[in-house]
Amino acid sequence: QLQASGGGLVQTGGSLRLSCAASGRTFSTRGMAWFRQAPGKEREFVSAIRWSTSSTYYADSVKGRFTISRDNGKNMVYLQMNSLKPEDTAVYYCAAGRIGSTDWSTMTSRNWYDYWGQGTLVTVSS
């Protein structure tokens, strides 16, 4: 259903662009998000984008460095990551939320999301 790609090894200060391809159903009416999970830590919210307005929301830790976008015609969601830091090292997951809109607080919760990709590993070396 969701296929994440684009991870890799990058040096501090570098950039990566993650992609999430949705297939098998229409995701254009669902909010989409990226989460990440570092070794030994819980999965945490990174960024979300609404289906209706394409407005976006970011965790404070990535605000100003990461940009989420979507292309409903291609069923794709992207995460442009700039100025990467070692603490950004994690497996990144894309997720598709429930149909319809909700508040940003709800969209930061893993419980809002029905579908998850398999994850792509991002490693930032110091």
Image (spheres, helix red, strand yellow):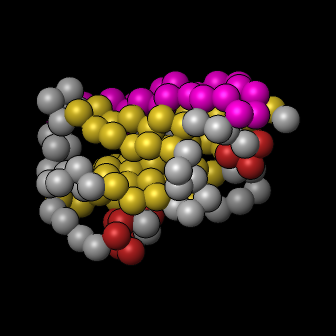
Q: Is residue 49 left or right of residue 43?
A: left
Q: Position of residue 89 (x, y in %)?
A: 70, 42
Q: Position of residue 66 (x, y in %)?
A: 51, 44
In the image, residue 87 above or below residue 117:
below
In the image, residue 97 above or below residue 69:
below
**Magenta span has 10?**
yes
Out of 77 and 12, give the one closest to the viewer.
12
Question: Within the image, what quadrant is residue 10 found in?
Answer: top right
Q: Is residue 84 visible?
A: yes
In the image, residue 85 above or below residue 7:
below
Q: Residue at x 53, y 55 (%)?
A: 63
**Magenta span has 14?**
yes
Q: Is residue 53 left or right of residue 114?
A: left
Out of 123 and 113, give the one closest to the viewer.
123
The majority secondary structure of the magenta stretch comes to strand
Q: Residue at x 39, y 35 (%)?
A: 78
Q: Position of residue 5 (x, y in %)?
A: 48, 27
In the image, residue 37 above or below residue 123:
below
Quadrant occupied by the C terminus:
top right
Q: Which residues are magenta?
A: 1-25
Q: Residue at x 71, y 34 (%)?
A: 13
Out of 84 and 34, give the one closest to the viewer.
84
Quadrant occupied by the N terminus:
top left
